[in-house]
Image (cartoon, helix red, strand yellow):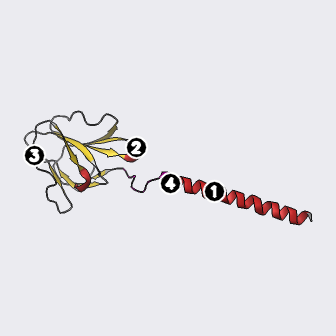
């Protein structure tokens, strides 16, 4: 009889432990969103940093953007200096931009490389837009 009792006790303990692990995994799965991916740019712009305050200014001669970084719960700021085409990944929802370049209009483009919004003039003023349809940026 002691062997049966010991096997039964082990089986119950194992079942309880397995159930606890399944519950723990299910709870972990609920708290992680599959869409929680940080926005990225390729190639990497001159400067990238995070702030809780958002985009407040842009250095002279630069085009700056702000997009929400859900995993970090902060605004991700990109500072572009070199001309070219930059590919955007996981840029979603509303964000901001400031074009403080010397005479160059910035362009935000969709997947077909057509304008998402009108060209952004170099007026050093903060503007807002929805990044969801933006796939590329051409600062100049």
> Which residue is outermost to the right?
1
Q: Can you give x and y, in whole percent of width and height, for residue 24 in the image?
A: 60, 54
Whether label 4 touches label 2, CB < 8 Å? no
Secondary structure under tag 4 reads helix
Whether label 1 touches label 2, CB < 8 Å? no
Q: Is residue 93 left or right of residue 115?
A: right
Question: Label 3: how many residues lie within 10 Å, few (<14), some (14-19) or many (20+)?
Answer: some
**Segment colored magenta:** 30-38
Question: Label 4: how many residues lie within 10 Å, few (<14), some (14-19) or many (20+)?
Answer: few
Instruction: Please identify the dominant SS of the magenta region.
Output: loop
CA gap between label 3 and label 1 equals 56 Å
The residue wearing badge 1 is 21
| Label number found at residue 72 | 2
The residue drawn where x is 31% and y is 51% is 40
Determine which quarter of the picture holds residue 48: top left
| Of pointers 3 and 2, the one earlier in the residue sequence | 2
CA gap between label 3 and label 2 equals 31 Å
The residue wearing badge 3 is 105
The residue wearing badge 4 is 30
């Amino acid at each position: 009889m002691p062997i049966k009792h010991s096997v039964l006790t082990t089986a119950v303990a194992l079942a309880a432990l397995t159930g606890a692990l399944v519950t723990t995994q299910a709870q972990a799965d609920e708290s992680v969103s599959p869409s929680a991916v940080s926005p990225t740019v390729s190639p990497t712009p001159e400067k990238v940093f995070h702030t809780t305050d958002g985009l407040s200014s842009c250095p002279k001669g630069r085009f700056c953007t702000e997009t929400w970084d859900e995993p970090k719960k902060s605004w991700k700021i990109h500072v572009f200096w070199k001309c070219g085409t930059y590919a955007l990944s996981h840029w979603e929802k509303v964000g901001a931009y400031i074009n403080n370049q010397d005479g160059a209009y910035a362009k935000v483009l969709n997947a077909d490389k057509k304008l998402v919004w009108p060209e952004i003039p170099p007026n050093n003023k903060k503007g807002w837009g929805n990044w969801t349809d933006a796939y590329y940026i051409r600062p100049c």
